[in-house]
Amino acid sequence: MQERLYRMLDKTRTLEKYIIMVLIGIALYLFVYGLLPLDVTNDMWIYSGYAGEADIIQHYSSWMLYRNSEWGWPIGKIVSLSGEECSTYISYTDSIPLLAIPFKLIRNFLPDTFQYFGWYILGCFILQSVFCGKIAGIFTQRREIIYPACFLFTLSPTLLERSFRHTALASHWLILAALYLYFKRKKSNKVTDIWVKYTLLSILCVLIHPYFLPMVLGILFAALIEIVVANRKDIFGYLRAIAILFINVSGAALCGYVIGLFGMSDIIAKNQDMGGYGFFSMNLNAVINPISHGYGCFGLGNSKWSVLLPAQSQTLGNYDGFNYLGLGILISSLTIGMLVCLVKEWRIMLWRKLKDNWGLAVLMLFFVIYAVSNVVTLGDKELFSYSVPRFLWPIFSTFKASSRYFYPVLYMIDIITVYFWGKLVKNKNCAILITIVIIQMIDFSEVICEKHYALTSKYVSADYETRCRLLEEWENAAIGYEKALLLDPVPDPAEMYWIAYAAGKTNIQNNFYIMNRGSIQALQRNTDLQVQSAIMNGAESGTMYLFLNPNYAKAFQLCMGEDYGIKEINNYWQSFWWVYKIQDSNHITGNIDNVSWSDLTLLPDSDVNIEITPESESVHRISGWVTVGGSESSDDVIILEIKTESGQSMYIPIRCIGKEPIDNSEFVNLWFEVYSDYDFETTSLALYCK
């Protein structure tokens, strides 16, 4: 009876700990972000570009695009109106398939406006606090250590910086969960009782953000290698370790296949370089550099995370490698380092822990090397670089933003801080840890205030009103249309975020290419063929034809004929030009000046350089340059005439992709390209330009 009572009391204390850890996560979330993001029917703060960052519009627009599209296979597929080759997958849009897929299943029961990002970040804060508490609970049962540790981990600058900017990348609790399983198994030196949990974590990584998968698998591998070495005479130990790794990788791969994670693998495999590895690297000053990517909130332009430390310079793509520790952790780390050097007992303890966890220590060293990458930078200087074996390119190009692989090291520094001050210093009042937390909060208090204000109803409403012109114009223009084709995609998908949001709000099917990986060349090729199809066969019924380049739109309108007009759809950041059939859109006003054939000049052959390169059996790439007068002119309307032997002409609008002044003269070279499926074996070419 007494033993049962003790067990009940122990369960009660454990439940109490969990409740407090959950409350800490909730309290810190509300402290930083408030209640506004938790309203699933409010997406104004997303469209406003939270904290000056547009990527969250991509994540949300991709969710709307996925929600409005038909089901395909794999289940995470978003079918593009530009053809199968240009379809994308929810895994590549950072829209968190873990939530997007089940919510699509019940989409008919959801409100018209539905965003889940606020609740997801709240969940990340709660899980961050809980797993921190569980890790601290392995080293100590003292609540005065565990609860301050929860504050310390949940107020991690990297977590706050990624939240709502790259929402899926705020799932740092996946790293903490893997580290917790690692330290938990140390008591029994067995991993067989937690391999299922590691497998679940691996699957969750695939369903949230694949960048976390190598981190989790790396921590699992460190645990397995330590066990195998410790029991090297156990032949079955090797087989168990291999089996556990195989099950983890297979489970993650199967899940990835079902949701379409490998849908773009053929495109990635064709990359001729490492796709950004070495560019998106971690600067050697990252842990002391309080500068993050972004433009600050409500016009202050503040991306500096410290009110005390100065900003450090960066280079290349170091802006993605924000790994600032915070002033509290920096002071703590320096203090612990000095004490380890001066106090023999601490030095022995540290060496003993490194020996006990040598696999994890080696893994952390590997993560540091990978994060720094093969292009080593310090400040604004590139110190040196080295070559990476070619067989590693597919892996390195897939996980190109290498700076993110410092996250596990960052949290190991936090764990060491909690361990030393909680385990070795025998103070009962936890004053040191609380002091570290306070210093951390003071250090980036200005950023926290900005983040909180940026998500207040007063700011969001005022900001939204100044930026929603596109949505209003789009809702008016989209009356009677079912599809929207953007016919001049650009390499930077950020220019399409705003109209993707508007299309999602009005349930218009579209081909807006809002993804992180893929072939922009394939999209340009297919949209060029759609342009030619519209010219030859007429516009598709119920389809809007949109352009980012007004001159390309004018060229298209001219080829389509006098029955078509051009309307500018404008918003705070970006304008789009819509070529529409006048008789079908009597509610549209505000045409721009059209170009007539009399405005164009047939260019002499001596001024034109055209190259035709076969792309496939039926598709050719036409590229080259043309010399024209007026280097300051913006009226670069170019039309290619293809004339057959019978004298029949076909006109194709040409995309101008660049200008190059000639020796500071009044002449300029216009570079152009277009894809066509016309039979060029029986044609002559002529170029018109304005």
Image: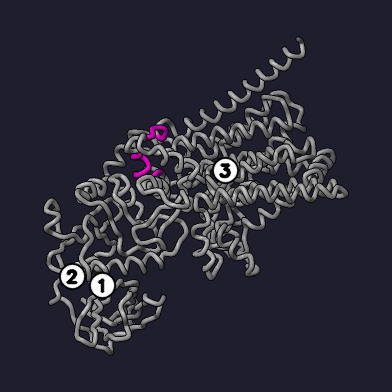
Residue that lies at the very extreme toward the bottom in this rendered image? 606
Q: Residue at x 51, y 28 (%)?
A: 27
Picture coordinates of residue 433, whole percent (x, y): 66, 31
Helix, strand or loop under label 3: helix
Marks 3/1: CA distance?
47 Å
Q: Residue at x 74, y 44 (%)?
A: 337
Q: Quadrant of residue 601?
A: bottom left
* Between discs 2 and 3, the one toward the N terminus: 3
Mark 1 lies on residue: 653
Mark 2 lies on residue: 558
> How many other residues sit within 10 Å of disc 3, few (<14), some (14-19) or many (≥20)?
some
Q: Nearer the viewer, residue 145 or 434?
A: 145
The colour scheme used here is: one colour
Q: Residue at x 26, y 68 (%)?
A: 533
Q: How many marks?
A: 3
Mark 3 lies on residue: 204
Which residues, given as a range, are shown in magenta? 37-50
Q: Amino acid at mark 2?
A: Leu
Q: Is residue 40 magenta?
A: yes
Helix, strand or loop under label 2: helix
Picture coordinates of residue 86, whole percent (x, y): 40, 61
Q: Nearer the viewer, residue 55 or 119?
A: 119
Picture coordinates of residue 270, whole percent (x, y): 52, 68
